[in-house]
Amino acid sequence: MNIVLDASAAIEMALNMKHASLFKEICANADCIFAPDIYPSEITNVFWKYRNFSSLDTTICEKGIEYCIELIDDFIHTKLLCNKAYKESIKYRHPVYDMFYLIVAQKYNAKLLTRDKKLAKISAEMNIEVISY
């Protein structure tokens, strides 16, 4: 099974939140874990927010960034996916950066692993199998 891992699910695992064990098991059993090449910047931004607004320790944030990046087997270049992501974002009235995850899932016949309920709903509408809790 191929997985597209989004930032919300990766953060869930990195910070050992409610569904971390389940998500880790899913990732451990995946044949390949994909993410668009915007993923590292999203992950880094999330940890920046945790550091600045939740006072999460800098070392924990830095280790979390490394952990999340190491989860990915293959980063997919988004340059050639921009037009499709743009069109789908207009159609579904949803930000382009999230649509890249769905376009990658379509391209690689992968399931989307996410904690983002709105993205999970759009995924289902696009006939992309989603794993979300």
Image (spheres, rainbow, N blue to C red):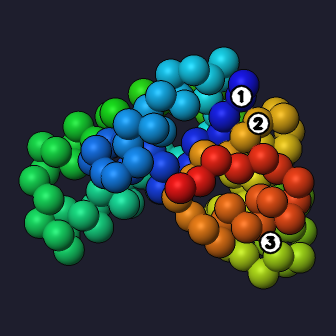
- Mark 1 touches mark 3? (CB < 8 Å): no
Residue 89, disc: 3
Question: Could you say which is closer to the camera, residue 58 or residue 1?
Answer: 1
Foreground mark, 3 or 2, reads: 2
Query: Which of marks 2 and 1 precedes in the sequence?
Result: 1
Task: Give the camera-side residue of 15 and 75.
Answer: 15
Under mark 3, the amino acid is: Ser
Residue at x 24%, y 64% (from the top left corner): 50
The disc, 1 or 3, on the residue closer to the chain's N-terminal end is 1
Residue at x 30% of width, y 56% of height:
47
Point out which mark residue 110 bears. Answer: 2
Give the Cα distance between marks 1 and 2.
5 Å
Q: Answer yes or no: do the residues labelled 1 and 2 have beta carbons within 8 Å?
A: yes
Which residue is tagged 1? 2
Q: Is mark 1 on a helix, strand or loop?
A: strand
Residue 35, visible in the rendered structure: yes
